[in-house]
Amino acid sequence: MGARGPENDESSGNRLLSPGWPLTIAFVGIPLWWVLGLFQIVFFLACVPMVIQLAQRRVMVPRGFGVWLLFLVWIIGGVFVLQVDAPATVPGEGASRYFTFAYRYGWYLAATIAFLYTVNMRAELSTLRISRAIGWMFVMLASGGLLGLVMPTLEFPSVAELLLPGSIANNGFVQSLIHPQVAQLQDFLGYVEPRPSAPFAYANQWGIATAATIPHFAASWWVGNTWRRWVVVILLPLSFLPIVGSLNRGMWGALVMMTLFVIAKVALTGRLQVLWASLVVVILAAATLVVSPLGDLIQDRLNTPHSNEGRANLSTQAVVSTWQGSPFVGYGSTRDVQGNFNSIATGSSALCPNCSPPPLGTQGQLWQVVFSTGFVGAALYVGFILGQFLRSLPRSTVIAVAAQASTVAALVTLPVYTVIHPAIVVIFISLGLLVRENPGARLRPLKSLLVPPRRNIATVLLLTIVGATLGMGLQLTQERPYAATQSVLVSTAALVNAPQARPFTLDTEARLATSREVLDTVAEVAGLTGGPDEARARMLITAEPNTRILNVTFSHPDRQKAVAGAQEAAARYLELRESMAEQVSTERAQNLQNYQEALAESVSMTNGVVERDEAAAPAAADEEEPLVLAALQGTLIDLRQEYAQVSSTWLGLQRDNINPGEDFNDVRVTRSQDPWFVYMTSGAMLGLLAGLLVAQLIDGRRDRVGRDPQERLDLGLPVVGLVGVTESGEFSSAELEEASWVARTYAPLAGICPVTTSMVAVDLAERLDARLRGPVDRGGVRVLLVATTRSAARPVRRLYRESVAMGLQPVGLLLIEELNRTAGTASTATEGGTS
């Protein structure tokens, strides 16, 4: 089960289209695909020949793969809620959501195909070769990272970018896929710092890909040829430069956890030399970071949280929005946040393109699956990866530890990095290598997972329909309110109609719009029994980004009350605003009047002094007197100007009417259909899940080998003989002789293995075993399995797997055809009780 020797690996690698060439071309050709603008697309293209090759064999899957199939099915439910508005997000619809959904689902399918390809190509494609292909990707990532540090501004149009129409090539999303650049230039440390990203568009994608590939590089490239070892010795230390320069704290954390994991694995296996060597390397690396400028860069990054608050807000809101709106199936895709987490009215603009936060479900794979597939989908996703990882823990081969470390990186970075790009293919290939490296992994045909729902399709469809019906019925019991929205254009003068008065922000205005006075009025108008608390729960205040337009929304099952509530809330808010403005303006006017009187007195006093000094000026002999007089005259002029300005302002306050704001547009009333889609889809998907589980239970009880076990068992095991048995459970001499002859045609045999749940099968196996006593008949690794037509299929599959796990080779099935027998026989009682 482990990696084949280097000589086998090299011989297979000398052929251009040797087994595994789709993976080889996808990984080894990364520099070419990057220049062509096909780096990410090539992994989709590589799936086509992989599927063709898999279709030509019986595809085997490990234990727990059904969980992943359920996840792939569960995602499809998101199609029906793509246009549903999530709480705290910008309302609206768009066809682009279907494209985004398809793109992400495509990556899940690509990862699935790569996983199955890795598991099933073990005879043709060595484990070492696969791990080295991933290691080559790390070589490209490290080289691209170094290039990003040396030439951070390097970028150029790819071939695909030149060939595509400008309307497509200039699209932001398409640009991120096909436009080659080597680094992102960011200044959140207080100075511009290049963050390596090649061949990816973003530094975070580079980070998770680097963390997932570095274990394979260090492990598989150290095995075998000397030149690869020199690459490890040279490139691994150099890779610390872009790793630190990327400023990816998530990647740093993943590398630390992987290092601790590997050291623990080595210590548990008793490889003391490897353990000491690992510790020395870690100490040297830490010392290098401390004494070099890299340590200062790490310290600067750790002292500059930068995105911590934003990530925390986004992840929290993603979970809250999912829980409040669609906890089971999520929303299918991401959504834009309403405003940002600092203000309800702030949005991106030409002057501040980053003022809008990223969409919900983009800052971490965990939050992405929670928001897009609900908590059920997230449990399936994490459960599959974690399950495969835990089953592989007992294995400690070099490649197994590398694949385990790669999986650790995926699990550690779940909250901070999304992997909907080539990194997910690397992660799932690592999971496939874990299966290959585990000789105790129980494999079963993929078709066997599909047989139960196919045989019980009526039950699955019925429960799906019942679930959808129950979901719609539950929605009928829920309140389905009308949402009335009254927009208000808030005056820029805010609450103080005076020069240099600082206007309130719309967040402050939103607080005023939900004040107790407004809520009391709305509760009275709408007849709410819950009073102001219920009114607050039914009211939503939003704002149009970068404007002074406030949206007051009130929800109620009665349309007229919804409209009345919104109108009354807006009207009462404007009244409060006007009242407060009048009060503040009155106070301002009184202060201005007092100030005006004080200025008048100062002007009078200063004027008297100036007149007296002017009269005494001709008799003054001191040279400083004219200077003092000039200063007094200047002060008098300033006081008169200040008095004139204050008088004008005071008169303006008395003359001008206060403008608190005005209603903007008519009341808009909507009644969302979103709850219907959420409840119906959630019910249908839960019903489908229940149907699949019931189908599995039913099929387990009814699944019998029958006279045609090929489809039932799907083991590729031929029926080599059909043996009849009498009603008393006896075999005729002719039947035994024919069965013995069949067994001898497969000699030498290691044994004849019966299904122990059937006494008839055990009896036949013992009789045949007694007839095969000679040295010519016994030996080797081949075995014949014995079962009856009424045997349950599951014990036969288990017997097959156990034989293979012991190194035996099942070559055929001896099938006993049982006739109707009396109910009291021991054979019938035994089989009926165990099946």
Image: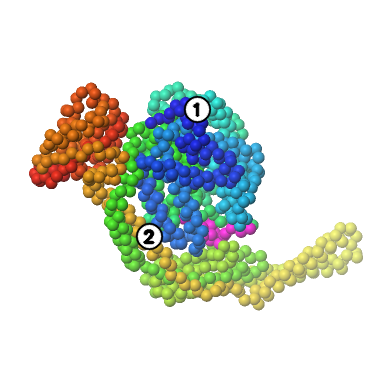
Task: Classify residue 233 as left or right of residue 748.
Answer: right
Magenta stretch: helix, strand or loop mostly:
loop
Q: CA distance from mark 1 to mark 2?
A: 51 Å
Q: Quadrant of residue 784?
A: top left
Name the residue that disc number 1 marks.
222
Q: Which residue is mark 2?
A: 681
Residue 300, how many percent across, how many down? 58, 40
Colouring convention used in this rendered image of the protein:
rainbow
Q: Look at the image and give the residue range highlighted in magenta.
A: 333-350
Q: Nearer the viewer, residue 820 or 460?
A: 820
Mark 2 nearby-residue class (10 Å; few <14, some 14–19, many ≥20): many
Residue at x 30%, y 43% (from the top left corner)? 714
Spot occupied by residue 540 in the image (x, y as percentages of width and height): 47, 65
Task: Kindly identify which numbered label has been placed on residue 189.
Answer: none
The amino acid pointed to by label 1 is Trp
Q: Residue at x 52, y 45 (%)?
A: 42
Confirm whether the magenta stretch covers residue 14.
no
| Quadrant containing the N terminus in the rendered view | top left
Quadrant position of the C terminus in the picture? top left
Number of numbered tags placed on the structure image: 2
Q: Residue at x 38, y 52 (%)?
A: 73
